[in-house]
Each structure stands twice: as structure tokens, then as C-alpha cells.
Image: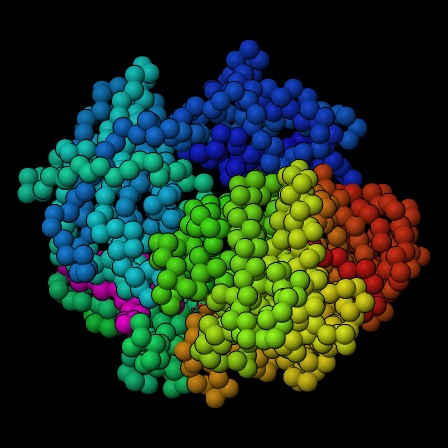
Amino acid sequence: MDVKHLSCEYRQNPIGLGTTHPRLSWQLVPDQRNQSQSAYQIQVALQIEDLERESALVWDTGKVLSDTSVNCKYQGPALRSMQRYFWRVRVWDRGDQPGAWSEPSFWEMGLLSVLDWQAKWIDPEGEIDPIAFKPCPYLRKSFRTQELKILKASAYITAHGVYELTLNGKVVGDCVLPPGITSYHRRLQYQVYDVTGLLRQGENAVGVILGDGWFRGSTDALSFRNVYGERLALLCQIWIEYADHTQEWMISDETWKTATGPLLKSDLKDGETYDARLEMTGWNQPRFDDRTWKPVRVVDFTYDNLVASDGLPIVRQENFVPTILHTPDGGTVLDLGQNIAGRIRMTVQGPPGTTVKLTHGEVLDPQGNFTMKNFEASALVRALTKLGPLLQEDRYILKGGERETFEPRFCYHGFRYVKVEGYPGEPIPENFTGIAIYSDMPKTGEFSCSNPLVSRLQKNIEWSMKGNFVDIPTDCPQRERSGWTGDAQVFSRTGSFIMNTVLFYEKWLKDLAADQRASGLVPNVIPDPSLHVDAGVIGATNGSAGWADAALIIPWTVYQASGDETILENQYASMKAWVDYVSSLALKVHWTKKLTPAHWGKAPDHWKYVWDTGYHWGEWLEPDVNPFLEMIVNFLFSRPQVATAYYAYSASLLSNTAQVLGKGKDAQYYHELSAKVKSAWFQEFASADGRIKPDRQASYVRALAFDLLPQEFRPKAAARLVELIQAANEHIATGFLSTPFICHILSQNGYPEVAYKLLLQQGIPSWLYAVTKGATTTWEFWNAIGEDGRINMSSHNHYSPGSVGSWLYEGVAGIKIDPKCPGYKHFYICPQPGGDLAQAQVSYQSMYGEIRSAWESHPDSMRLEIQVPPNTSATVQLPGVLPEQVTEGGVPLERIEGLQGIRLIGKDLEFDLGSGTYLFKYPYSIGRTSNPRSYN
Ligand code: BGC
């Protein structure tokens, strides 16, 4: 058995690692069914050729009897800064036959100590007006390398602001908006680039442009500016190793020079203004005449917050050629046909000084004209917050002559439509390209089915994910672009199926821990733009239940999807701090209770587990609730039912986490705590007839999803949920928090047909309503466009309602994680056909290889195709089927290689599969299972 797809820290041949125990993974190449690994051997060396010389190895595990093939941590001698390590692996199959050694792979370390920084922080700007938008500083330096062959050269760079690095006129790397956004005061990422091929013997030049980025550009809902500081700065060093093994550094210092040029304004949200007439040809080449350029200032910014880039870079992804619309109001509008986060690259030719303006929006108004009305806050909100309009405007001023190409560098927009003004001549589609940008996560999940509207919904879910995974999980890519914790957690299960999110969330959760207060409070938005101010209307909403619980829910979700304990180890202290903080808050009593007779005597014992103080967003955006009234109610009365439910849920996730990490005492303590909170919740909010206060869909979904009810109440709660759905004419009425669970809960509690009714509903509110209105992403409000075509003030690219995706993959198509064996080492296949679907298929690229479940219903039978990757196993569950009714490739069940443990559990047939591809045929039965699988 051979191995392929070697990866280190979830990447191929990564450079600049900060971890001292990199995680090594590989996949097995099987040629037969039922294959698994019985042992492995890893070897690591400093030179590729040393892998063949035993005495030169840095680390040799020898033969390790283990089936681990994913995230095997390096445990050899301490790794050295900047060193490249080559590695290879071989495995033994289940019959103990060794395979061949893999092709060598490598990883390279970043700077492991602050002392590795030779460069100085430099500040290019003179006197500045902090309020005004400022032109982007250009920085340059010429330097000579020795007249020797360059063996290797690496650039280490970061900035206050965002940067573009060039060497001898060539842009280095393909990251967009480096160094990305983190909680800068505590964690500022540097990037490492291999620049060996860009340097030459003799004269060289390094050039860097700085932009405002998240550091001092507009961020967040209220477009705060100068959040992390008022001045930009650069830190850059290039390490060069020559053929004779001598080495030298080129560093940022007082010898660099600076000027401003064509980039007159660069704001992340507002957009960019570029005056091509001010270009400085050759500015980043050697021998450029920089006598008029000014010296930079060395400044003493800290190095203590510098961290390696352990996340994934934002890169340019899909391209779109637009159609050109001539709108009734005489406008020229590009239509990408897809709502994205990204920007436009434009080619243009015309007289010097001509200004082309590109304004980016998401919708057309009912008359078909370009509009930004859906971003316009009400007059009251604008007055209270001094919120200006969202601009999303790029301006390009032509230098004239040849054809010119423009793409903004330091901003992105959330848009499908672009209003073009001032374009010289007739704009044609070929002169514009829409470019989507997002974090470079590997795509893992695919889903499609026979209903084209549902398949389009899946595409919309994917596109809202792409638009909101731009370095941090944002709520929307236009209006706020903030790392809203609640939005992030509700989508994390769906998102972790569509893409491999491990590195993405690991990075963001480190920022969550960095921004968590000493008390344990987690702010609503990470990175936290309020910089630790928990006062005022915005600060006071920090620590909201269901939002701050992202601190627990996301690590647990990512662990389930990856089987990788690292995220639990990293976050444990933060998870615990949040639950302990909530415990301290639960001891307080809400003011309304203080007025009740119960409070005058001895307060009921369970009150100390009821969390009924503080601001909570609550269920948020239930379709029949006005959000502004909801906020007022939240402030006045808190949301004890929601908050206490999350308290119980997070305590149980913490107990599970402690269990995984071998912290037995904590596991026990938080398990008991969760049980006490559940019982308090039940006493406070449920009644003997099974009713929950408030008697709304969300309450029942949450109670069932978080296991808040004694067993005998579960059927009553599920039945009441169904009644409420029927009373709403088979429409969903949940908000942010319960939408991810509603279909799971229905199908796990015996009502898959009702889940299908909700999925296939096309009236407001429903998922497919937006699809029928031509949406290409999922909307924040169910009625973002009203039935009369009215555009409501709301975002058209919010991934939160797309959290139904996980039910499509786990419920409809049936690939389910086994919570006891996470990361798909063992998983379940239990498809639930229903509704008008004749066929559905899902595939998931696990770390072991592809998992597939595809069903097709025929008049008299079902076909189910399953793929199980090597070194994993699956349990298949077929409801209402008998063993003798099933064949695989025409062969009866008991004679199939790789299949074991045929059993009937209730009315469900179950059996276990080893690796391989299988095609089952059995009689059609509607998917009502008696033994639901869930990891909640
Ligand atoms: C955002 C959300 C967020 C919410 C808090 C909104 O403005 O867009 O998605 O979770 O505020 O309720």
C-alpha cells in the first residue's frame, strides 16, 4: 500500500511555520476493498538526499504500530528558526506488508524567537491628519547582493496596515491584503515568501506599498477608523544565502526612502482612488532616481506581538465576465451574475485625466436600476450613530495613451452589480473581470439533488461562505464585515463540511482568546474593534448568549469535523473562562425578579443556575419580530430562556472537551453543572404539559437540540414544534440561533417529512423564496426582497440562514460524523430520502480521501452508492429494510467483501463497511429512522 497527498499543518510544503510540533498527514492508495494501515514510519532530514542516509536523519520514528495517518505530530528534536525540513513516510497494510516510501515533502520554519528579527520598524509618513484619507506611502531601497550564486532567499514581512511587496518590480506572492486581520495589539502575523527566483547578483531593489487596511481604515458596522493606530509602518527583512554558504540580511531601516504616488486613497470599505498620471515608473527597480524621495523614520513599535501566519492567505479565486446592462435610468451597470466579495479588474483606454467611477452594490431596484438602498440605515439609526453611507466606490483616473488596467489593491467589496460612470467609449464585457477573493481553504463538500432550486440553494450557501470567509468569519462582506461571533458559530457546522476550516478557525479562535477579557467575557465581534471597551450601547451587548458561545461551539465543531484535538488544546482555557464567567453571572438576579414575592423570601434554589441578566441578542431575527423592538426588549428584560439554554449547552461541550483532553475532574464538574442548569432551565421555562415559554418554534428546537428536556418530554416537544409549523402554514419561524437545527431536530425526532416541507417551501419565510427571487447568496432577512419587489434594508450576503446546509449533507444525503470517532475515521451513512427528491448526492474530501453517498429512487427500489476511503470505516443505516432485501452489485448482503455486523436495530437495518466503493439496491422506504445519529 502506497501513500500520497502528504501534508503538513493541512498544507503542502508550507513555509514560515510557527508551531514546534507540526501535524503530518498522508493518504493511502488502496487497490482493494477494506484497506487500512497497521503501522507507519516517518523520517525527517535537513537535506532531501539525507533521507536516504540513516545517520543523517533528524527524526526517524521507526515502525510505529498505529493506524494514525492524519495529524501525526512531529516529536523529534527541537526545530530551528528558518530551517527547511524534508520528510517522507511509508505504511504497512492490514496484512503487515510495507509499501514504498512516499515522495519527499517539506516544511520550513518561521522565526521562532523575537531575536530573529533584524529589521527595524519604519514609519514613512510625516505630519498627518488622522481624520483625512491619506495617499498610500510607497517605500523603496536599492541593495547589492554579492557576485555569488544565490542558493536561497526568503522575505519576512509585516506591517501596520496592509502591504504589497515587490522585488525588482515583481509582486511577491499571491496573497491579497496581507498581513490579514488579527487582534493586532496581541497578535500581528508576519508572512514568509521564498524569493530566491526574484533576486539577482548585483543591483536589486525592494519596494513596498502600504495601505490603511483594517489597521486604520474603516472597519465594522459603524465604520470606525484608526482602530489600531493612526500611523502605518513596515517591518521587512530578506535573508540571503549564497553558494559558499555565507549569509546576509537586507532589512528595513533608516536607509529606506519614501514618497506618495498614484494611490490617493485606499479604504477597505469606502474603496480606492488611483490617479495613473502620478505613477512613478520604475519606482521599485534598482537605479531609480529617488533623490526627491524622503527618508523614513525608525520607530520603536513592539516585536512582542509578532506571530507566524498559521491561517490561510486570502487569494484571488473565481473570475467572472459580466453582462452589461443599460438600465431604465440611463445607467451602465455590470452584472456578474453572482454576488461575491471581491473587486473588478478593468481595462480602459482614453484621454488623460478621465475619471472612471465604479460603485458596487448587491441589487437592482424594482425598476431595474442600480441601488444601494439595502445598505441604507434608517434616519434614526444614522442620527444616533453618525453612520455615513457605505460607499464601495473605486475611482481610476487615466494617464492616457495605451490601454490601461486597474484593479484596486487594498480594498474589497460585497457586490453583484457595478455602476460604471465616466468610462470613455462603449464598455464591453471583456474589459471587466469580477474577481472573487477569499481565504484559500480547500473545498471539501459537494451536494446536489434532483430539485434544481435546492441545488441552487446549496450554491448560494457556498457563495455566502466564500463571501464571508475573508480571513475572518464575517457577518456580511459589505455593510459590516465584522467577525460576529454568533453568525460564525451558527454556520460553523455547515462551513466545516463545505471547506476544510481547521486553519481558518484555529487562527480566528486565537484572536477570540486574545480579545477575551480577564473576567472571561467574550466580545460580540472578533477581532474586537471596541478594543476592550464594554460600555456604551455597543460594548454593553458584549457577552451575549449564543454569540459568545462561539468560544465553545466552534472548537467542538471543528474537532468533530477534523478529529484534531489541537483546537481543543489551544482553546481550553478560553472555553473554561467563558463558562466560569457565565456561572458567576447566573448567580445574579434580574431586576424584574427582585420585584416578585419569591425573591423576598428564600429564593428558589434553581435560580442560581438561571442566567437572566445582561444583554442578549436572543433568537434574533425571527421573521415576525421587529429587530429594533427586539433589541429594546433584550435590554429591558434580558433573554433568560435563550441564555440559560446556552449556559447548559456550553457547559456540556466543555465537559466533552475535558473528557477528550483527559481532564477527568473538569469533565465531571462541568457535566454535573450542565445537568443542574438543564434542570433549572426546565423548572423555569417548561411546564408539565410539555409547553415551553415562549411557545415558539425556536424554543422547542433549542430544547431538543441542546437536550434540555427529560426523555419523556421530547416527543411532546417535537409534536408541539410540528403543530407550530403547521399553524404557520408549513413555514419556518426561527431566527439566527435555531435555524441550523430545525431540520435536524425534525428528522431526528420522527418528522423528516416536515423537515422536507420546510426545505421545499417557496413562500416567505423560506430558504427557497430567495432562490425563486433570483438570489445567488443567502440573505440576512427572509424578506430582503419583498413579494412586491420592495428592497428592504438588509444584507444579501449573510451566511447565517445557510446553516441549513448541514442538514442537506447529513440528513438528506446522509453522511454523518461519529462523535466518538471524529474526523470521519468512522462515520455513518444514513440518507433520508423525502419530499419530491428523486435523487441526491453528497461527497466530502476527508483527510483520508473521498467519502460519497448518492441515492436514487426508482419506482420499485432505491440505489445507494457509497464510497469509504482507506483507513476509515462506515456504518450504514437503512430505515425500514430487511437484510434479505438488500444486494450490493447483485450479491446478497452477507457475501459482500468488506461488509460486517449485519443487524436490525428497531426497524433499521445496520451494517459496517470497510474502505471501497459499493452500490446497494433495496426496496424504497421513506426515511423515518428509529435510531437517529447526531453529534449534538
Ligand atoms: C449583523 C449580524 C449580527 C448582529 C447582532 C448585525 O448587524 O449583521 O449578523 O449577528 O448584528 O445581532
| Residue 562 spot, x, y in % from top left | 61, 45
Figure disc tally: 0
537 left or right, relative to 719: left
Q: Is residue 189 magenta?
A: no
User: Where, by quadrant of the figure, is residue 909 drawn?
Assistant: bottom right
Quadrant containing ligand 1 = bottom left
566 left or right, relative to 201: right
| Residue 455 spot, x, y in % from top left | 60, 67
Instruction: List the single residue furthest toward the front.
Output: 601
* Residue drawn at x 90%, y 56% as measured from the top left: 904
Task: From the image, give the main secondary structure of the stretch colored magenta.
Answer: loop
| Residue 342 spot, x, y in % from top left | 38, 60
Q: State the extent of the magenta-drawn residues as a range.
A: 386-415
422 left or right, relative to 882: left
Instruction: List the single residue furthest toward the right.
Output: 884
| Residue 805 spot, x, y in % from top left | 61, 63
Visible in this render: residue 474? no
* Residue drawn at x 30%, y 30% as measured from the top left: 117
Q: Is residue 414 magenta?
A: yes
Visible in this render: residue 259? yes
